[in-house]
Protein backbone atom coordinates (compact mmCIF):
# COMPACT_ATOMS: atom_id res chain seq x y z
CA UNK A 1 0.00 0.00 0.00
CA UNK A 2 2.79 2.46 0.88
CA UNK A 3 4.53 1.66 -2.41
CA UNK A 4 1.44 2.79 -4.32
CA UNK A 5 0.68 5.85 -2.21
CA UNK A 6 3.92 7.73 -2.82
CA UNK A 7 3.79 7.55 -6.64
CA UNK A 8 0.13 8.59 -6.57
CA UNK A 9 0.98 11.63 -4.46
CA UNK A 10 3.82 12.52 -6.82
CA UNK A 11 1.56 12.26 -9.88
CA UNK A 12 -1.07 14.38 -8.16
CA UNK A 13 1.51 17.04 -7.38
CA UNK A 14 2.67 17.13 -10.99
CA UNK A 15 -0.90 17.56 -12.21
CA UNK A 16 -1.43 20.44 -9.83
CA UNK A 17 1.81 22.16 -10.88
CA UNK A 18 1.26 21.75 -14.64
CA UNK A 19 -1.30 24.60 -14.99
CA UNK A 20 0.82 26.82 -12.73
CA UNK A 21 3.85 26.30 -14.99
CA UNK A 22 1.78 27.13 -18.07
CA UNK A 23 0.45 30.26 -16.42
CA UNK A 24 3.96 31.36 -15.44
CA UNK A 25 5.12 30.87 -19.03
CA UNK A 26 2.25 32.93 -20.39
CA UNK A 27 2.85 35.74 -17.89
CA UNK A 28 6.56 35.68 -18.72
CA UNK A 29 5.75 35.78 -22.46
CA UNK A 30 3.60 38.86 -21.92
CA UNK A 31 6.28 40.57 -19.80
CA UNK A 32 9.06 40.14 -22.39
CA UNK A 33 9.36 41.55 -25.93
CA UNK A 34 8.20 38.19 -27.40
CA UNK A 35 4.67 39.47 -28.00
CA UNK A 36 6.01 42.22 -30.30
CA UNK A 37 6.60 39.56 -32.97
CA UNK A 38 4.68 36.44 -31.90
CA UNK A 39 1.07 35.57 -31.24
CA UNK A 40 -0.19 32.29 -29.84
CA UNK A 41 -2.65 31.38 -32.60
CA UNK A 42 -1.59 33.24 -35.73
CA UNK A 43 1.49 34.31 -37.64
CA UNK A 44 2.52 37.90 -37.00
CA UNK A 45 6.14 38.91 -37.65
CA UNK A 46 7.26 35.50 -36.45
CA UNK A 47 5.45 32.17 -36.51
CA UNK A 48 2.45 31.43 -34.31
CA UNK A 49 3.60 29.80 -31.11
CA UNK A 50 1.23 26.89 -31.72
CA UNK A 51 3.03 26.30 -35.05
CA UNK A 52 6.33 26.18 -33.20
CA UNK A 53 4.87 23.73 -30.68
CA UNK A 54 3.54 21.51 -33.48
CA UNK A 55 6.83 21.55 -35.39
CA UNK A 56 8.88 20.47 -32.37
CA UNK A 57 6.33 18.17 -30.69
CA UNK A 58 8.04 14.95 -29.65
CA UNK A 59 11.50 16.18 -30.70
CA UNK A 60 14.30 15.16 -28.35
CA UNK A 61 16.01 18.23 -26.90
CA UNK A 62 13.28 20.61 -28.09
CA UNK A 63 13.21 22.55 -24.79
CA UNK A 64 16.95 23.18 -24.90
CA UNK A 65 16.87 24.01 -28.62
CA UNK A 66 14.05 26.53 -28.28
CA UNK A 67 15.46 28.00 -25.06
CA UNK A 68 18.74 28.63 -26.87
CA UNK A 69 16.97 30.31 -29.77
CA UNK A 70 14.86 32.42 -27.41
CA UNK A 71 17.92 33.62 -25.49
CA UNK A 72 20.46 33.92 -28.32
CA UNK A 73 18.22 34.61 -31.31
CA UNK A 74 18.14 32.68 -34.58
CA UNK A 75 17.86 33.16 -38.31
CA UNK A 76 16.52 31.16 -41.21
CA UNK A 77 14.38 28.70 -39.24
CA UNK A 78 11.03 30.28 -40.15
CA UNK A 79 11.95 32.42 -43.13
CA UNK A 80 14.30 35.32 -43.76
CA UNK A 81 13.29 37.46 -40.76
CA UNK A 82 15.86 36.98 -37.97
CA UNK A 83 14.78 36.61 -34.36
CA UNK A 84 16.94 38.86 -32.17
CA UNK A 85 18.46 37.91 -28.85
CA UNK A 86 16.07 38.33 -25.94
CA UNK A 87 16.77 39.78 -22.51
CA UNK A 88 16.00 36.57 -20.62
CA UNK A 89 17.91 34.41 -18.20
CA UNK A 90 18.61 30.74 -18.93
CA UNK A 91 15.79 29.78 -16.56
CA UNK A 92 13.34 32.22 -18.18
CA UNK A 93 14.26 30.93 -21.64
CA UNK A 94 13.62 27.37 -20.47
CA UNK A 95 10.28 28.34 -18.90
CA UNK A 96 9.22 30.06 -22.13
CA UNK A 97 10.30 27.08 -24.24
CA UNK A 98 8.38 24.65 -22.02
CA UNK A 99 5.31 26.86 -22.18
CA UNK A 100 5.47 27.18 -25.97
CA UNK A 101 5.82 23.39 -26.33
CA UNK A 102 2.79 22.88 -24.07
CA UNK A 103 0.51 24.82 -26.43
CA UNK A 104 -1.96 22.75 -28.46
Image (tube, rainbow, N blue to C red):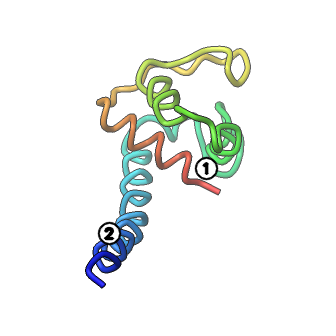
Q: Can you say whether 101 is above or below 64 in the image?
A: below
Q: Look at the numbered disc 1 and give the secondary structure of its residue.
A: loop
Identify the residue at horizontal 41%, vertical 24% (top origin): 71
Q: Which quadrant: the C terminus?
A: bottom right
Instruction: Please count the marks in the image.
Output: 2
Residue ID for mark 1: 40
Q: State how far apart marks 2 and 1 are (Cα).
A: 31 Å
Identify the residue at horizontal 71%, vertical 15% (top origin): 80
Badge 1 crowding class, 10 Å Cα cut-off, few under 14, some 14 to 19, many 20 or more, is: some
Q: Earlier in the sequence, mark 2 or mark 1?
A: 2
Residue 90 figure quarter: top left
Q: Look at the numbered disc 2 and give the secondary structure of its residue.
A: helix
Identify the residue at horizontal 35%, vertical 65% (top origin): 17
Identify the residue at horizontal 36%, vertical 72% (top origin): 16
Residue 3 appears left or right of 23: left
Report the front residue among 101 and 49: 101
Residue ID for mark 2: 10
Q: Can you say whether 27 is above or below 20 in the image?
A: above
Badge 2 crowding class, 10 Å Cα cut-off, few under 14, some 14 to 19, many 20 or more, is: few
Report the front residue among 10 and 93: 10
In x, y percent, where is residue 94?
39, 37
Q: Which mark is residue 104?
A: none
Q: Which quadrant: the N terminus?
A: bottom left
Q: Can you say whether 56 is above or below 76 in the image?
A: below
In x, y percent, where is residue 67?
45, 31
Residue 22 appears left or right of 88: right
In x, y percent, where is residue 51?
70, 42
Q: Nearer the viewer's eye, disc 2 or disc 1?
A: 2
Amino acid sequence: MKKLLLPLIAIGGMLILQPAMAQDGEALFKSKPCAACHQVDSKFVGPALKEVAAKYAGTDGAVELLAGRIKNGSQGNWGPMPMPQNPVTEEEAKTLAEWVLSLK
